[in-house]
């Protein structure tokens, strides 16, 4: 097997959910509150009476800017993918290839910023809707022209857009608008460039641990025999979806691994509550599982991790896993968060001592021919879609677990639950 096949094959987002964000951008109301803004050379001081128009336009700029970041993130930095740009087609978008069989095909930072600017120019008028919802008459004297600037922690949009507002028989002109979004988009762009640099320097191999040094979740999904998509995920949300930046690579060899883990995802556990998780492989015949994280142990033949967290375990940890299949060694890194108390986002269920508790979980896929696979974190009987549990007297209290859904080895989403046993 080629070393390039030894890559992480899980995505820390739901592709179907992100597709919805790309295809159905919702326009925010003009009253939306955005980041604080500062004066620049482009944006001149606005007459006090024209301040409502300034705020109205910049609210739409914030919403349109977020849309631009989501779209560019899903297409490898492009809001308008050029016809001659190499790409990998996924179920939710076409992702620009930044590495194409030994060639550097990534856009420059300036080209990405230009794409964001172009999107703002094209979509901002639609958001404003001919100012039909604005309380005063507005005339457009010149179409918008935007300059986007990408920094490590912000994306700034400065737009020249000459508008006339009539207020109490007085005509007021505003021609410069500015908004800035605090975002990890620029850092994700840097991570994507670092991955492309690594591939150009080491075209025949990839080190999964390389992905863990950037402070962002980075995962890899193999689409076809010589195509992969890197998914760079931040801890912020845009339009209700996680910040995601995707780039793809096209190779001149088969990237499909002979064996791999099929249910990797971020995990959570709670102090004092037994935790268990069964790590699965594509082919579990004659394979050995191992873990190289101090304080954590995995069943070598079954791949089951079991432990009860202690108070001193609270915090974020990384589980370093290995799958040995003959001469093939697959290494992965999985984050696990241990909390002192039950996470606030947990849905609550109730069970009674001595009474068999059954609960079915929604695991249906939007594609009926490809059902999701469900896993549970916790010492419960779970058949992939329903949980069965008969509490004992010793079980009185709260029991935390999560249901994780996968689609052919790709992590879709997870839901946290707490069973209360009075």
Image (cartoon, grey):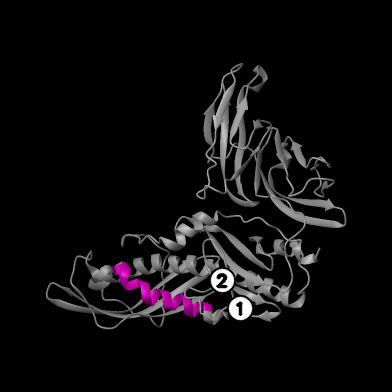
Q: Position of residue 277 (x, y in %)?
A: 71, 40
Q: Nearer the viewer, residue 312 or 205?
A: 205
The residue tagged 2 is 76
Assign the C terminus to one quadrant of the image.
top right
Residues marked 1 and 2 touching at CB (< 8 Å): yes
Q: Give neighbour class at mark 2: few <14, some 14-19, many 20+ (Cα, 10 Å).
A: many
Q: Which residue occupies the foreground of this view, 44 or 104?
A: 104
Q: Is residue 139 above or below residue 22?
A: below
93 sits left or right of 128 in the view? right
Which residue shows up at 59% across the image and 77% down it?
86
- Residue 79 visible within the image: yes
Please name the predominant secondary structure of the magenta segment in the image.
helix
**Residue 130: percent from left, percent from top:** 24, 71
Work out whether mark 1 precedes mark 2 in sequence or the reverse, and give the earlier one: 2
What range is drawn magenta here? 112-128
Image quadrant of residue 297? Answer: top right
Q: Residue at x 19, y 65 (%)?
A: 135
For the residues labelled 1 and 2, the Cα–Cα distance comes to 8 Å
Q: Give the labeled residue for mark 1.
A: 106
Residue at disc 2, secondary structure: loop
């Amino acid at each position: 097997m080629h070393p390039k096949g030894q890559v992480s094959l899980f995505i820390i987002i739901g592709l179907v959910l992100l597709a919805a964000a790309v295809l159905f951008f919702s326009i925010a109301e003009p009253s939306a509150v955005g980041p604080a803004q500062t004066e620049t050379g482009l944006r001149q001081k606005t007459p006090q009476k024209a301040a409502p128009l300034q705020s109205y336009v910049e609210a739409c700029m914030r919403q349109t800017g977020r849309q631009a970041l989501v779209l560019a993130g899903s297409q490898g930095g492009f809001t308008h993918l050029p016809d001659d740009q190499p790409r990998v087609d996924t179920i939710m978008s076409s992702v620009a290839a930044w590495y194409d069989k030994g060639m550097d095909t990534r856009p420059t930072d300036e080209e990405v910023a230009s794409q964001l600017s172009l999107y703002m120019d094209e979509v901002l008028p639609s958001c404003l809707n001919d100012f039909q919802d604005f309380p005063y008459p507005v005339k457009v004297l010149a179409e918008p022209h935007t300059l986007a600037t990408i920094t490590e922690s912000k994306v700034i949009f400065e737009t020249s857009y000459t508008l006339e507002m009539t207020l109490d028989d007085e005509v007021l002109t505003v021609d410069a608008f500015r908004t800035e979004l605090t975002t990890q988009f620029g850092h994700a762009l840097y991570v994507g460039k670092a991955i492309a640099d690594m591939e150009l320097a080491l075209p025949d191999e990839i080190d999964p641990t390389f992905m863990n040094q950037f402070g962002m979740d980075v995962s890899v999904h193999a689409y076809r025999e010589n195509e992969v998509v890197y998914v760079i995920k931040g801890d912020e949300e845009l339009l209700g979806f996680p910040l995601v930046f995707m780039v793809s690579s096209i190779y001149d060899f088969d990237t499909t691994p002979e064996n791999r883990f099929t249910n990797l995802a971020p995990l959570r556990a709670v102090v004092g509550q037994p935790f268990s998780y069964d790590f699965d492989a594509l082919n579990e015949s004659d394979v050995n599982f191992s873990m190289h994280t101090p304080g954590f142990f995995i069943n070598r033949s079954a791949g089951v991790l079991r432990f009860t967290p202690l108070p001193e375990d609270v915090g974020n940890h990384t589980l370093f896993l290995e799958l040995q299949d003959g001469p093939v060694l697959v290494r992965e890194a999985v984050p696990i968060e241990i909390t002192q108390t039950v996470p606030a986002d947990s849905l609550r269920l109730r069970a009674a001592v001595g009474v068999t508790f059954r609960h079915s979980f929604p695991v249906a896929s939007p594609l009926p021919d490809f059902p999701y696979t469900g896993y549970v974190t916790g010492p419960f009987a779970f058949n992939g879609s329903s949980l069965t549990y008969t509490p004992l007297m010793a079980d009185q209290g709260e029991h935390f677990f999560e249901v994780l859904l996968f689609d052919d080895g790709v992590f879709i989403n997870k839901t946290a639950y707490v069973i209360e046993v009075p």
